[in-house]
Image: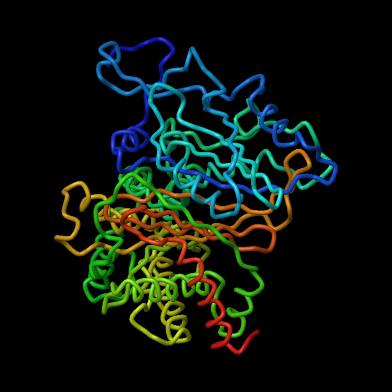
């Protein structure tokens, strides 16, 4: 490639996200935050909030670059700084139509999330949204996956918040020095015993969002030779479990559902939160985890939703679920009691949507999660990353070969649970009262459910193809019904 001053080569992972994008599959992650204005806020609070962001003096370099390729770059994609940066294109002020319900807000977010980011400009937008009838202020932000991964985007937002309600003059998320996101620049080396922070972030995001499928995980797995000797046996065991429809890092037996087909570019978004104490109460009464109960809520909601559409498969649906593990050290025999390293992997969990009883579903899900964790915890961190990449690879191959509906999907959807701050946070005195991730459906995987805990609540963000996933908002009602059913089955109120 011809070297062009001022340009930086885009790494293969980011390039893959850029080239995979099309009108039906925009590759940006997003987030919706709800703020309660401070008690002393005047009538111009929202306008001042918008103007303080718009008038940011120095923009962080991450938010000034855009992809470019030409004859001078040898046709290779490079990052180029936007010499005509227009902050008013990226920071926008919107108002909801009356009556200003949450319904109107979610409809707007769905439409904003449907629109691709233009390569001619830096790949991000922030929308300050007023007009909610209850006086709250919303902020929707989207960033291209080539810039940051989903977890880094959430960390970036958190980095400009404060637990001090009296703090003022706080910077915008895109201000220079305001926060640090994991930019996709150069790969970091991986040691045999543990994954560095950047690789863990990449693997975590691969498991938590539908967009991060091969990316850094595959690159990490292929770059490591120290654990190669342990891979064949692990692969054989994993494939054997997948063929027998047992919990594993690889699924080969997911049934076809309405979610596993080609999608359009239009999006629907639904969001709601539930008290963590209610979810924890079910877990304590049944000897299961919070994540097990979240999955059971989704399972019951899926069963009711698909039954209503006369589309419930006879077999149990399968979800890809991220898990944090204590893995064994490289060179230590499987099952050895010695200390291991931490790793992030993925488990293909049977959601038990074929079972009518909510208690049965929860027990099946809990056992499925335990089996998957035990299988992965016998591996080293690097083996876990590699095995998770193998498990997720079919969800890329099938859409690329346009084989949706011809072959069975590797899994039906992704459900993830991302821990967040436990105490209230503020931005210039405005309290953050709701935090919901907006994710990326892809061809063959039309629905993504991502949950984030914050200040005692569990926020669910449901992102789906507007045409493929009809009446998405109905899932919120079914999630609420299922939590109540789980509480009744567990004997808690």
Q: Where is residue 191 in the image (x, y as percent from the top left)?
A: 44, 45
Q: Please, which residue is most extreme toward the front here?
A: 98
Q: In this view, does 159 lie above or below 327?
A: above
- The residue sitting at 57% across, 61% down in the picture is 272
The image quarter containing residue 304 is bottom left
Q: Is residue 171 visible?
A: yes
The image quarter containing residue 53 is top right
- The residue sitting at 29% across, 34% down in the picture is 19
- Taking the image as shown, residue 366 lies to the left or right of residue 432, namely left
444 or 81: nearer the viewer: 444
Q: In which quadrant is the N terminus drawn? A: top left
- The residue sitting at 68% across, 63% down in the picture is 456
- Taking the image as shown, residue 460 lies to the left or right of residue 159, namely left
Q: Where is residue 274 in the image (x, y as percent from the top left)?
A: 61, 67
48 or 302: nearer the viewer: 48
Q: In which quadrant is the C terminus drawn? A: bottom right
- The residue sitting at 53% across, 60% down in the picture is 460
- Taking the image as shown, residue 489 lies to the left or right of residue 215, namely right
155 or 462: nearer the viewer: 462
């Amino acid at each position: 490639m011809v070297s062009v001053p001022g340009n930086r080569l885009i790494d293969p992972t980011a390039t893959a996200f850029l080239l995979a994008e099309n009108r039906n599959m925009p590759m940006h992650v997003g987030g919706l935050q709800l703020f309660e204005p401070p008690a002393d806020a005047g009538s111009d609070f929202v306008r001042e909030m918008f103007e303080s962001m718009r008038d940011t003096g120095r923009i962080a370099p991450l938010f000034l670059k855009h992809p470019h390729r030409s004859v001078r770059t040898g046709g290779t994609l490079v990052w180029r700084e936007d010499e005509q940066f227009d902050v008013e294109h990226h920071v926008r002020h919107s108002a909801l139509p009356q009556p200003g319900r949450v319904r109107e807000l979610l409809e707007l977010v769905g439409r904003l999330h449907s629109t691709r980011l233009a390569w001619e400009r830096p790949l991000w937008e922030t929308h300050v949204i007023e007009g909610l009838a209850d006086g709250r202020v919303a902020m929707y932000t989207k960033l291209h996956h080539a810039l940051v991964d989903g977890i880094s985007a959430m960390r970036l937002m958190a980095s400009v918040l404060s637990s001090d309600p009296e703090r003022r003059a706080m910077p915008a998320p895109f201000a220079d020095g305001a926060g640090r996101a994991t930019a996709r620049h150069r790969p970091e080396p991986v040691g045999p015993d543990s994954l560095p922070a950047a690789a863990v972030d990449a693997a975590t995001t691969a498991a938590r969002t539908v967009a991060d499928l091969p990316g850094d995980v595959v690159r990490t797995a292929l770059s490591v030779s120290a654990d190669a000797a342990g891979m064949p046996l692990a692969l054989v065991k994993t494939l054997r479990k997948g063929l027998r429809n047992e919990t594993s890092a690889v699924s080969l037996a997911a049934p076809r559902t309405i979610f596993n087909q080609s999608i359009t570019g239009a999006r629907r978004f639904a969001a709601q939160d539930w008290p963590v104490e209610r979810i924890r109460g079910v877990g304590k009464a049944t000897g299961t985890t919070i994540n097990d109960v979240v999955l059971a809520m989704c399972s019951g909601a899926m069963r009711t939703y698909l039954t209503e559409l006369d589309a419930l498969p006879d077999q149990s649906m399968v979800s890809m679920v991220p898990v944090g593990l204590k893995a064994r050290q490289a060179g230590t025999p499987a099952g050895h009691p010695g200390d291991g390293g931490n790793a992030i992997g993925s488990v293909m969990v049977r959601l038990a949507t074929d079972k009518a009883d909510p208690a049965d579903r929860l027990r099946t899900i809990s056992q499925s999660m335990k089996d998957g964790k035990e299988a992965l915890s016998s591996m080293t961190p690097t083996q876990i990353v590699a095995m998770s990449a193998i498990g997720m690879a079919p969800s890329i191959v099938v859409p690329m070969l346009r084989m949706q509906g011809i072959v069975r999907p590797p899994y039906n959807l992704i459900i993830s649970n991302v821990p967040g701050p436990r105490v209230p946070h503020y931005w210039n005195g405005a309290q953050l009262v709701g935090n919901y991730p907006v994710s990326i459906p892809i061809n063959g995987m039309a629905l993504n459910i991502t949950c984030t805990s914050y200040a005692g609540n569990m926020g669910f963000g449901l992102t789906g193809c507007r045409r493929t996933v009809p009446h998405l908002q109905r899932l919120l009602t079914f999630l609420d019904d299922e939590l109540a059913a789980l509480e009744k089955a567990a004997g808690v109120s």
